[in-house]
Amino acid sequence: MLSWLRRTLESSIGKKMLMALTGLGLIGFLLGHLAGNLTLFADADGHAFTAYATALNSNPALPVIEIGLTLLFLAHIVLALKVSRENREARGKGYTLRNDHGARTPGSRSMLITGILVLLFIIVHLVDFRLQKPPIEEMDTLAGMVKTRLGGTLGFLIYLGAMVPLTLHLSHAFQSALQTLGLNHPKYNGLFKVISIVLALVIGLGFATFPLAYFFGGNAS
């Protein structure tokens, strides 16, 4: 197992495939996280979100899940940096003409930059809501804390602004992952591109609804 992993990490194709798999795993996490957070809109008093958050934090498997998710993030980031470096080395000098330049999109051209920005946002988000969250016995205050954080000017700007690089990143990430894993066919590539863009908009706009709702709608329940 270890020898297979070492050989995979030593090959360019292996690193790209692992990066694609970890990326798809993170997209799945984002969809689940968004679905859970949407319970904030289920009722005015935040009871549904409280129930969701309490069940999540009371799950004895949560530490294992968090460790796994952290490793998934770290693996994706490290692999992305390695692949980006190898791509630069393979191209040689910076002025080398790319044959696929015309097919590139804002999302594909900015993958490394948007990835770094998303990483910085994740750190802020973890400090904001994970490290400073109230204990489980005070979880009824969590919905109010979310509204207060996102209803403030700084929170609104940070959380809404972060959705721009996240959406750009995802707009290319999904179709790129599928192509890396072998789902690359002229007949379906257009469909994969549309699905990738729609998925990016669903996730990006979905998360953007929270700062928009609480900043312009106020913090009142």
Image: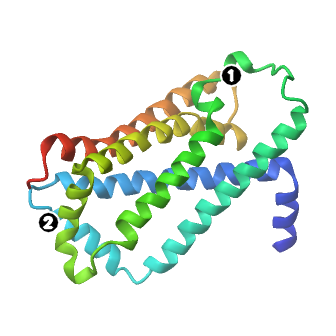
Front position in the image: 88 or 18: 88
| In this rendering, the label closer to the viewer, 2 or 1 | 2
- Report which residue position mark 2 lands on: 47
Which residue is rendered at x = 63% and y = 38% of the image?
A: 111
In the rendered image, the residue lying farthest to the front is 154
> Toward which corner of the image does residue 98 lie, by quadrant?
top right
Image position, residue 154 (x, y; %): 31, 49
Which residue is rendered at x = 17% and y = 72% of the image? 140
Asked where in the image residue 203 lies, by quadrant, the reply is: top left
Depth check: 152 or 108 in front? 152
| Colour mapping used in the image | rainbow
* Residue 171 higher or lower than 7, as above or below: above
Q: Residues within 10 Å of mark 1 (few under 14, many from 20)?
A: few
- Front residue of 174/135: it is 135
| Residue 75 locus on image (x, y percent) | 67, 61
Helix, strand or loop at mark 1: helix
Residue assigned mark 1: 186
| Relative image position of residue 30 (x, y in whole percent) | 44, 52
The residue tagged with tag 2: helix, strand or loop? helix
Identify the residue at horizontal 62%, vertical 34% (top origin).
110
Count of residue discs: 2
Residue 115 in the figure: left or right of residue 166: right
Query: Does residue 139 appear to the left or right of 155 in the view shown?
Result: left
Specify the amino acid type for callout 2. His
Q: Quadrant of the C terminus?
A: bottom left
Q: Amino acid at mark 1?
A: Pro
Mark 2 vs mark 1, CA separation in Å: 48 Å
Number of other residues with Cα within 10 Å of mark 2, as a class: few under 14, some 14 to 19, many 20 or more:
some
